[in-house]
Amino acid sequence: MTSRFGFALLAMLAVPATSLVLQTTELKSFGASTSASTLHPDATAKLLATIQDTWKNVARSKTEEHLQSFDKSCKTVTSAIISGSDGDHDRVQTYMDEVCQQSFLDTWHKGACQQFQNAVGKSMTFNNYANRASFNYDAFCISFFNVFAVQETAAFEKEEVVRLAAEKVALEKEVADNKEKAKKAEEARKAEEEAAAWKAKKQAEQKAIDDAKAKEAEEQRLAKEAKEAKEAEEKENAKQKKLLMEANARAAALRKGRAAKALKEAQEEAKQAEQKAAEQKAAAEKAAKIEAEAKADIEKAAAEAMKEAKENLQKKEAEAKQLQEVAQEAKAKAEAGRKALESEKKAEEESKAWMATMKAEKADDAAVQKRPVVLKVHSAEDSKAKEADTKAEAEHQKQKDEVKDLLAQAKKGVELAVVKASVKK
């Protein structure tokens, strides 16, 4: 009996893989003994569970190939169970009870196992021989399949409803998640745009601040440079003014010293002439007078030159200040400088005319005293008086030259101011 059940199971393993795949080792037969411990119901349960999975697919698909596969496997399994039990109805039910109660089977496999057990039990009789010899496998498998197929179709439809509902819930959840993601993405985009706008605004504000600082720094730099330029110009003007004053002072001191020396020498000569000859008293007095007039002329010329130099310096300062404000005033100041130069030339010409007048007057005086001088031409005293006159005239000419030099210096200062004004313009 053991060999028959084993052979039946081996025959079941020979079912084509496309219709029924059974992967197991060897399912031992029920054996001749009635002891359940030797029947290995766990192996039977595993094999039957695999077959039930195949039957479920057949019942749900119902293709011709699958129906043929079910018919063949159903007959093979049923035949193995009945043959292995020698057709004993009770032994089949007892064994199948133990098979269907294996702990590793889930609810569906237990239920399908019990359904198969009940169907086999109802189809078997209590005649062992009749069950072995005349059990109608075709009718049993058709009847079992019809009931099993209805149940599995209903279960499939129910599962399909559940699956579709789950898919719907999953789809709705996916749509909701996508909406939420889209919403978050939109919010993130808006936040990013707002952040970019805020950043651009801050950058623009910072740029405006930086530009304002740069502009302020540039204005401060320009103001500083203007201030430094003004201070340098004022310093240069002060330096020029000081140099001019020092030059004027040195010139005045020089003129004063020379005049004092000339006066002293003239006085000494006059005194000597007065002591030596009374006749030369008038000539000495006249020489002293000429010297006094020359001194007065020199001092007057020096005062006028100093005055003109100061006036020119003041004009120069005024022109320099006005040239900084408007270029037109520089031109006017240059014109004033030229007029001043013409005035100086005129003054020089007047001075020459005055000197010519003085010379003419001197000649007249000499004509008045011509006879006495001729009478005394060979006298020693007369020679000394003539020598004194010559010295006085030379000194007077020297002083005239100094006046001309002073006027030339003043003219040069004016021309320098004009040139500076033109350069600044």
Image (cartoon, rainbow, N blue to C red):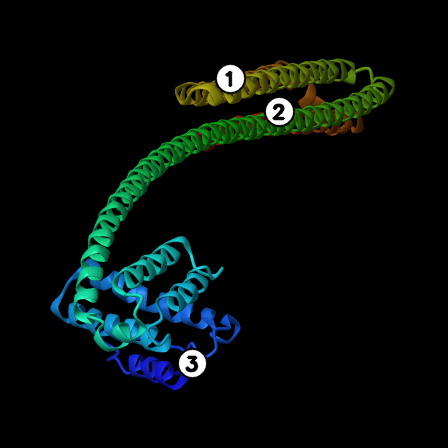
Mark 3 or 1: the one toward you:
3
The residue tagged 1 is: 350
Quadrant housing residue 193 = top left
Residue type (three-letter) at the residue carrying disc 3: Thr
Residue type (three-letter) at the residue carrying disc 2: Glu
Please tell me how many numbered marks the rendered image carries: 3
Q: Position of residue 254 (x, y in %)?
A: 74, 27
* Residue at 77% in and 25% down: 262
The residue tagged 3 is: 25
**Residue 52's disc number:** none
Q: Is residue 394 visible?
A: yes
The residue tagged 2 is: 234
The residue lying toward the viewer, choosing from 36 and 189, is 36
* Residue at 35% in and 35% down: 180
Category of crowding for the residue at label 1, using alpha-carbon neighbours closer than 10 angstroms: few (below 14), some (14–19), many (at least 20):
few
* Residue at 27% in and 48% down: 159
Left or right? Give the position of 334 relative to 50.
right
Q: Position of residue 221 (x, y in %)?
A: 56, 30
Q: Position of residue 140 (x, y in %)?
A: 21, 65
Tell me which numbered mark, 3 or 1, is placed earlier along the sequence: 3
Q: CA distance from mark 2 to mark 1?
A: 37 Å
Q: Position of residue 365 (x, y in %)?
A: 62, 14
The residue lying toward the viewer, choosing from 2 and 107, is 2
Q: Secondary structure at mark 3?
A: loop
* Vertical placement of residue 102 versus 333, above or below: below
Q: CA distance from mark 3 to mark 1?
A: 155 Å
Q: Secondary structure at mark 2?
A: helix
